[in-house]
Amino acid sequence: MQTDQRPHALRVAGRYAKDTYNYFRGLLKGPTEEEQNAWLKEHHPWALPLIDKAIADALAEYRARHGKEAGRE
């Protein structure tokens, strides 16, 4: 006589559903800014100063066009 396997099957299905949910949530959420910077520092350490300079240049140009206080929060 076969025993009831539902509790084990439900545990497996629940674990699968949770793992699947967390996987897709991670894909939709994406990496945080800190994670992106850590990856850049590890793989392309020369990129961060260039990115910072590009942002500073763009902000300076925007402020020159729209006034000194523009772009400040």
Image (cartoon, rainbow, N blue to C red):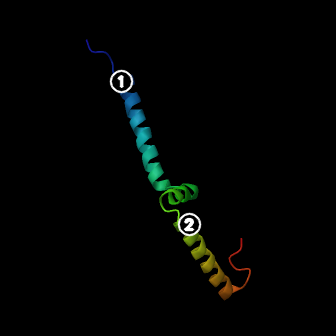
Q: Which secondary structure, mark 2?
A: helix
Point out the image quarter for the N terminus: top left
Q: Residue at x 36, y 24 (%)?
A: 6
Q: Residue 39 at x, y = what percent? A: 50, 56
Residue 67 placement: quadrant: bottom right
Q: CA distance from mark 2 to mark 1?
A: 53 Å
Q: Which of the labelled discs sits on residue 48, or is there none?
A: 2
- In the figure, 65 relative to 34: above or below? below
Judge the density around disc 2: few (<14), some (14-19), many (≥20) Cα neighbours within 10 Å: few
State the residue in front, 27 or 36. 36
Give the residue type that dot 1 points to: Arg
Give the residue type that dot 2 points to: Leu
| View extreme (top): residue | 1
Q: Which of the labelled discs sits on residue 6, or is there none?
A: 1
State the residue in front, 36 or 1. 36
Q: Residue 62 at x, y = what percent? A: 64, 83
Q: Is residue 31 left or right of residue 59?
A: left
Q: Nearer the viewer, mark 2 or mark 1?
A: 2
- In the figure, 56 relative to 35: above or below? below
State the residue in front, 40 or 72. 40
